[in-house]
Amino acid sequence: MKLKNWIAAAFGAAAVMAAGPASATAVGLELMLLVDVSGSVDSAEYDLQKNGYVNAFNSVAVQNAILASQGGAIAVTYIEWSGNTQRATQVGWTLINSVASAQQFATALSGVSRAFAGNTAIQDAIGLSYGAFGTEVGGASNGFESLRQVIDVSGDGADNNSATFCAAGCGRNAALAGGVDTINGLAILGEAGLQTYYDSFVKGGTGGFVIAATSFADFSRAIQDKLIAEIRVPEPTSLALVGLALLGAGVARRRVTRR
């Protein structure tokens, strides 16, 4: 775990709220949901996948994880992707800091219409989307500053169409090199070798992991587990970390204002 996350876990909201310029909203986590809507996902499977996200943000378990996270607030965006020119932000960056705002985000998701149904350019989806995190990765402000930037990728197939980035993890590598902290995967099983692909070329960074859904029918369970794991702040491994408290605000500020 990075030192910044140890410190944040020790201080919680104090470190978060001390960070960042006044024009940005400080949150513990910015979470980017990258969702596969390629042609291998039929309409019924698309509905199961989208409704899995809706159900997750309406669930008490996910809501409690958000309220117990760093600063009690996260920012989330929902992006659908398919071929190498096909990425659409379906729900923009949204502050979730209460049960009501989680439910409002779920309502926004429920109103989304499918954007694409093409090939599977997972590396382009990662490598060409991470700039939306904004100032933490050297981009224009998205209205939020955070201690952690996490990409959540879900899909049912390995890359077959990336143009800008090679299939062997180049989009993942570019995002991590650009400043993204963690990339996690949810592999919807069916295609041979898919979980191995996600383990080898999708997950990365601090604490990156892959969760498998046995089918689209299992997606709702899997995405709820995944979101809770991403939102939850790991406990400090030593009480000695409390001694870093006096450094908290300064470290947090340096972290969120990097370029």
Image (cartoon, rainbow, N blue to C red):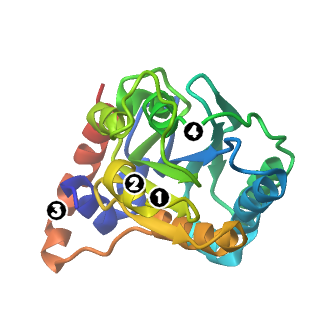
Q: CA distance from mark 1 to mark 2?
A: 5 Å
Q: x%, y% of residue 95?
A: 63, 47
Q: Which residue is mark 3?
A: 244
Q: Which residue is mark 4?
A: 120
Foreground residue among 219 and 76: 219
| Residue at x 75%, y 67% (from the top left corner) | 55
Q: CA distance from mark 1 to mark 3?
A: 42 Å
Foreground residue among 214 and 126: 214
Q: CA distance from mark 4 to mark 3?
A: 45 Å
Q: x%, y% of residue 77?
A: 62, 43
Circle nearer the N terminus (2, 4): 4
In the image, residue 114 above or below residue 131: below
Residues at discs 1 and 2 in contact (Cβ within 8 Å): yes
Lateral position of residue 242 relative to residue 23, left or right: left
Q: Can you tell which quarter of the image residue 90 is in?
A: top right
Q: Which residue is mark 1?
A: 194
| Residue at x 33%, y 47% (from the top left corner) | 181
**Where, quadrant-wise, is the N terminus in this rendering?**
bottom left
What amino acid type should be assigned to the residue bearing mark 3? Leu
Badge 3 element:
helix
In the image, residue 122 above or below residue 63: above
Q: Residues within 10 Å of mark 1 (few under 14, many from 20)?
A: some
Is residue 69 in view?
no
Determine which of the numbered discs, if any, sits on residue 197 in the image. Answer: 2
